[in-house]
Protein backbone atom coordinates (compact mmCIF):
# COMPACT_ATOMS: atom_id res chain seq x y z
CA UNK A 1 0.00 0.00 0.00
CA UNK A 2 1.42 3.35 -1.05
CA UNK A 3 1.60 6.32 1.31
CA UNK A 4 -1.19 8.01 -0.66
CA UNK A 5 -3.43 4.96 -0.26
CA UNK A 6 -2.79 5.03 3.48
CA UNK A 7 -4.14 8.57 3.84
CA UNK A 8 -7.60 8.80 5.38
CA UNK A 9 -9.74 11.96 5.51
CA UNK A 10 -12.89 12.18 7.59
CA UNK A 11 -14.98 14.29 9.94
CA UNK A 12 -14.27 13.45 13.57
CA UNK A 13 -15.46 14.08 17.11
CA UNK A 14 -12.64 13.88 19.65
CA UNK A 15 -13.38 11.56 22.55
CA UNK A 16 -10.12 11.63 24.47
CA UNK A 17 -6.88 13.58 24.25
CA UNK A 18 -3.77 13.21 26.39
CA UNK A 19 -0.13 14.17 26.29
CA UNK A 20 2.21 11.66 24.69
CA UNK A 21 5.98 11.47 25.02
CA UNK A 22 7.75 14.82 25.22
CA UNK A 23 5.93 16.99 22.68
CA UNK A 24 3.14 14.89 21.18
CA UNK A 25 -0.54 14.21 21.77
CA UNK A 26 -2.46 10.95 21.63
CA UNK A 27 -6.14 11.14 20.67
CA UNK A 28 -9.12 8.84 20.28
CA UNK A 29 -11.89 10.06 18.00
CA UNK A 30 -15.08 8.81 16.41
CA UNK A 31 -15.42 9.56 12.71
CA UNK A 32 -18.41 9.77 10.41
CA UNK A 33 -17.28 7.18 7.86
CA UNK A 34 -14.58 5.10 9.56
CA UNK A 35 -15.75 4.66 13.15
CA UNK A 36 -13.33 4.93 16.04
CA UNK A 37 -9.76 5.93 15.24
CA UNK A 38 -6.67 6.45 17.39
CA UNK A 39 -3.87 8.69 16.29
CA UNK A 40 -0.72 10.44 17.46
CA UNK A 41 -0.17 14.09 16.63
CA UNK A 42 3.59 14.56 16.62
CA UNK A 43 4.79 17.93 17.87
CA UNK A 44 1.24 18.96 18.87
CA UNK A 45 2.36 20.28 22.24
CA UNK A 46 4.75 22.82 20.81
CA UNK A 47 3.49 26.34 21.41
CA UNK A 48 3.53 27.30 17.72
CA UNK A 49 1.68 24.17 16.59
CA UNK A 50 -1.75 25.49 15.54
CA UNK A 51 -3.21 22.06 14.89
CA UNK A 52 -2.22 20.94 18.37
CA UNK A 53 -4.38 23.66 19.90
CA UNK A 54 -7.40 22.28 18.04
CA UNK A 55 -7.00 18.86 19.63
CA UNK A 56 -9.37 19.26 22.56
CA UNK A 57 -12.02 16.86 23.89
CA UNK A 58 -15.37 17.10 22.05
CA UNK A 59 -13.89 19.15 19.19
CA UNK A 60 -15.47 18.59 15.77
CA UNK A 61 -12.63 18.44 13.24
CA UNK A 62 -11.84 17.49 9.69
CA UNK A 63 -8.80 15.26 10.00
CA UNK A 64 -6.31 13.65 7.65
CA UNK A 65 -4.37 10.76 9.08
CA UNK A 66 -1.80 8.35 7.78
CA UNK A 67 -2.91 4.83 8.64
CA UNK A 68 -0.60 2.59 10.62
CA UNK A 69 -0.83 -1.01 11.79
CA UNK A 70 -1.60 -0.11 15.41
CA UNK A 71 -2.07 3.64 15.56
CA UNK A 72 -2.51 6.35 12.94
CA UNK A 73 -0.48 9.54 12.51
CA UNK A 74 -2.19 12.91 12.21
CA UNK A 75 -1.22 14.77 9.05
CA UNK A 76 -3.59 17.76 9.32
CA UNK A 77 -6.79 18.95 10.96
CA UNK A 78 -9.17 21.89 10.80
CA UNK A 79 -12.32 22.93 12.63
CA UNK A 80 -15.66 21.84 11.21
CA UNK A 81 -17.40 24.27 13.52
CA UNK A 82 -16.29 26.53 16.34
CA UNK A 83 -16.88 24.73 19.66
CA UNK A 84 -19.23 26.25 22.19
CA UNK A 85 -18.14 26.68 25.77
CA UNK A 86 -19.33 24.03 28.23
CA UNK A 87 -19.73 24.63 31.94
CA UNK A 88 -18.31 22.11 34.41
CA UNK A 89 -21.52 20.09 34.65
CA UNK A 90 -22.00 19.92 30.88
CA UNK A 91 -18.37 18.98 30.40
CA UNK A 92 -18.63 16.20 32.98
CA UNK A 93 -21.63 14.62 31.28
CA UNK A 94 -20.10 15.07 27.83
CA UNK A 95 -17.10 13.13 29.13
CA UNK A 96 -19.43 10.24 30.06
CA UNK A 97 -20.82 10.14 26.52
CA UNK A 98 -17.32 10.27 25.06
CA UNK A 99 -15.94 7.52 27.30
CA UNK A 100 -18.95 5.26 26.67
CA UNK A 101 -18.40 5.65 22.94
CA UNK A 102 -14.73 4.82 23.31
CA UNK A 103 -15.20 1.68 25.39
CA UNK A 104 -18.24 0.21 23.58
CA UNK A 105 -17.00 0.51 20.00
CA UNK A 106 -14.36 -1.30 17.97
CA UNK A 107 -11.58 0.42 16.05
CA UNK A 108 -12.34 1.25 12.42
CA UNK A 109 -15.89 -0.11 12.52
CA UNK A 110 -18.06 2.43 10.63
CA UNK A 111 -21.29 3.39 12.41
CA UNK A 112 -22.62 6.62 10.83
CA UNK A 113 -25.78 6.42 12.96
CA UNK A 114 -23.67 6.57 16.10
CA UNK A 115 -21.66 9.51 14.77
CA UNK A 116 -24.88 11.46 14.20
CA UNK A 117 -26.16 10.52 17.65
CA UNK A 118 -22.95 11.62 19.36
CA UNK A 119 -22.93 14.88 17.43
CA UNK A 120 -26.55 15.58 18.46
CA UNK A 121 -25.78 14.68 22.07
CA UNK A 122 -22.83 17.04 22.39
CA UNK A 123 -24.93 19.84 20.94
CA UNK A 124 -28.10 19.32 22.97
CA UNK A 125 -26.19 19.06 26.26
CA UNK A 126 -25.96 22.85 26.01
CA UNK A 127 -29.74 23.23 25.85
CA UNK A 128 -31.31 20.42 27.90
CA UNK A 129 -30.77 18.60 31.17
CA UNK A 130 -27.34 17.00 30.56
CA UNK A 131 -28.05 14.15 32.95
CA UNK A 132 -31.11 13.01 30.99
CA UNK A 133 -29.44 13.67 27.64
CA UNK A 134 -26.50 11.42 28.46
CA UNK A 135 -28.72 8.70 29.90
CA UNK A 136 -30.70 8.74 26.66
CA UNK A 137 -27.47 8.63 24.68
CA UNK A 138 -26.14 5.71 26.73
CA UNK A 139 -29.29 3.64 26.21
CA UNK A 140 -29.36 4.38 22.47
CA UNK A 141 -25.65 3.55 22.26
CA UNK A 142 -26.30 0.11 23.75
CA UNK A 143 -28.91 -0.61 21.09
CA UNK A 144 -26.73 0.64 18.24
CA UNK A 145 -23.72 -1.41 19.35
CA UNK A 146 -25.74 -4.55 20.12
CA UNK A 147 -25.12 -4.52 23.86
CA UNK A 148 -28.65 -3.57 24.97
CA UNK A 149 -30.17 -5.62 27.82
CA UNK A 150 -33.54 -7.35 27.54
CA UNK A 151 -36.09 -4.93 28.99
CA UNK A 152 -39.39 -6.54 27.94
CA UNK A 153 -39.06 -10.25 28.66
CA UNK A 154 -37.68 -12.19 31.59
CA UNK A 155 -34.21 -13.48 30.72
CA UNK A 156 -34.83 -16.55 32.87
CA UNK A 157 -38.21 -17.88 31.65
CA UNK A 158 -38.66 -15.82 28.49
CA UNK A 159 -42.15 -14.60 29.42
CA UNK A 160 -43.11 -11.01 28.75
CA UNK A 161 -43.00 -8.79 31.83
CA UNK A 162 -46.33 -6.94 32.02
CA UNK A 163 -46.19 -3.15 32.05
CA UNK A 164 -47.22 -2.72 35.69
CA UNK A 165 -45.66 -5.90 37.07
CA UNK A 166 -42.83 -5.90 39.57
CA UNK A 167 -39.47 -6.90 38.12
CA UNK A 168 -35.79 -6.98 38.91
CA UNK A 169 -32.74 -6.38 36.79
CA UNK A 170 -29.77 -8.70 36.48
CA UNK A 171 -26.64 -7.01 35.07
CA UNK A 172 -24.98 -10.43 34.89
CA UNK A 173 -27.81 -12.10 32.95
CA UNK A 174 -28.41 -9.02 30.83
CA UNK A 175 -32.00 -8.06 31.53
CA UNK A 176 -35.19 -8.36 33.54
CA UNK A 177 -36.10 -11.07 36.02
CA UNK A 178 -39.84 -11.50 36.63
CA UNK A 179 -41.43 -11.98 40.07
CA UNK A 180 -41.99 -15.71 39.51
CA UNK A 181 -38.36 -16.35 38.65
CA UNK A 182 -37.14 -13.98 41.35
CA UNK A 183 -38.69 -16.20 44.01
CA UNK A 184 -36.27 -19.00 43.23
CA UNK A 185 -33.39 -16.97 41.91
CA UNK A 186 -30.09 -17.61 43.64
CA UNK A 187 -27.92 -15.31 41.56
CA UNK A 188 -26.19 -12.29 43.06
CA UNK A 189 -26.51 -8.68 42.03
CA UNK A 190 -30.24 -8.35 41.36
CA UNK A 191 -31.54 -4.79 41.44
CA UNK A 192 -35.14 -3.65 41.64
CA UNK A 193 -36.47 -2.36 38.31
CA UNK A 194 -39.99 -1.01 38.80
CA UNK A 195 -42.63 -0.25 36.22
CA UNK A 196 -41.86 3.49 36.31
CA UNK A 197 -38.16 2.84 35.79
CA UNK A 198 -38.88 0.64 32.78
CA UNK A 199 -41.19 3.29 31.30
CA UNK A 200 -38.46 5.90 31.75
CA UNK A 201 -36.00 3.57 30.01
CA UNK A 202 -38.31 3.29 26.99
CA UNK A 203 -38.91 7.05 26.94
CA UNK A 204 -35.18 7.79 26.90
CA UNK A 205 -34.52 5.03 24.37
CA UNK A 206 -36.86 6.67 21.86
CA UNK A 207 -36.34 10.31 22.81
CA UNK A 208 -36.17 12.64 19.79
CA UNK A 209 -33.36 15.07 20.57
CA UNK A 210 -34.46 17.60 17.97
CA UNK A 211 -38.14 17.62 18.94
CA UNK A 212 -38.44 16.05 22.40
CA UNK A 213 -41.90 15.35 23.72
CA UNK A 214 -42.69 16.48 27.26
CA UNK A 215 -42.29 13.83 29.96
CA UNK A 216 -41.98 13.76 33.73
CA UNK A 217 -39.22 12.16 35.77
CA UNK A 218 -39.37 10.92 39.34
CA UNK A 219 -36.15 11.09 41.27
CA UNK A 220 -36.32 7.54 42.65
CA UNK A 221 -36.95 6.08 39.20
CA UNK A 222 -34.15 8.13 37.67
CA UNK A 223 -31.66 6.93 40.28
CA UNK A 224 -32.83 3.33 39.90
CA UNK A 225 -32.38 3.51 36.12
CA UNK A 226 -28.90 5.02 36.48
CA UNK A 227 -27.86 2.35 38.95
CA UNK A 228 -29.04 -0.50 36.70
CA UNK A 229 -27.67 1.03 33.51
CA UNK A 230 -24.19 1.83 34.75
CA UNK A 231 -23.91 -1.44 36.64
CA UNK A 232 -24.82 -3.27 33.43
CA UNK A 233 -22.23 -1.30 31.46
CA UNK A 234 -19.61 -2.20 34.06
CA UNK A 235 -20.39 -5.89 33.51
CA UNK A 236 -19.99 -5.40 29.76
CA UNK A 237 -16.69 -3.50 29.94
CA UNK A 238 -15.26 -5.08 33.09
CA UNK A 239 -13.81 -1.77 34.21
CA UNK A 240 -15.13 1.36 35.95
CA UNK A 241 -15.71 4.53 33.95
CA UNK A 242 -13.37 7.35 34.95
CA UNK A 243 -15.98 9.90 33.88
CA UNK A 244 -18.49 8.52 36.38
CA UNK A 245 -15.94 8.93 39.15
CA UNK A 246 -15.54 12.56 38.08
CA UNK A 247 -19.33 13.05 38.24
CA UNK A 248 -19.31 11.61 41.73
CA UNK A 249 -16.55 13.99 42.80
CA UNK A 250 -18.64 16.89 41.55
CA UNK A 251 -21.63 15.63 43.52
CA UNK A 252 -23.60 14.92 40.34
Image (cartoon, helix red, strand yellow):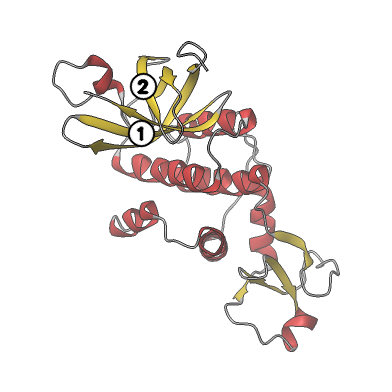
The image quadrant that residue 152 belongs to is bottom right
What residue is rendered at 66% in x and 69% in y? 194
Return the residue nearer the eye: 122 or 29: 29
x then y, percent, for residue 165: 77, 72
Q: Is residue 211 visible?
A: no
What residue is rendered at 48% in x and 37% in y? 128
Count of marks overlaid on the render: 2
Marked residue nearer the N-terminal end (1 or 2): 1
**Residue at far left of view:** 47
Return the residue nearer the eye: 222 or 8: 8
x then y, percent, for residue 245: 34, 58
Distance between the alpha carbons at the discs numbered 1 and 2: 10 Å
Question: Is 184 left or right of 115, judged from the image as shown?
Answer: right
Residue beneath disc 2:
74
What residue is rendered at 64% in x and 83% in y? 187
Image height of 78 relative to 105, above or below:
above
* Circle 2: element type: strand
Residue beneath disc 1:
27
Packing grade of label 1 (10 A; few <14, some 14-19, many >=20) is many
The image quadrant that residue 173 belongs to is bottom right
Packing grade of label 2 (10 A; few <14, some 14-19, many >=20) is many
What residue is rendered at 63% in x and 44% in y? 140
Q: Is residue 48 visible?
A: yes
x then y, percent, for residue 201: 65, 54
* Circle 1: element type: strand
x then y, percent, for residue 1: 52, 18
Amino acid sequence: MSEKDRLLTDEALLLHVRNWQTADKYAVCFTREHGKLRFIAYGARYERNVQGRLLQPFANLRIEVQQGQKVDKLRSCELVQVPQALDVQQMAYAAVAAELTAVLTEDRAPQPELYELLQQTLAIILERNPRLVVLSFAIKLLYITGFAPQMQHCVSCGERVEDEAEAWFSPLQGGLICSECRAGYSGDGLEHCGAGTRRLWQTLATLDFEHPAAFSVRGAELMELEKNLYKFIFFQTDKPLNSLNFLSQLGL
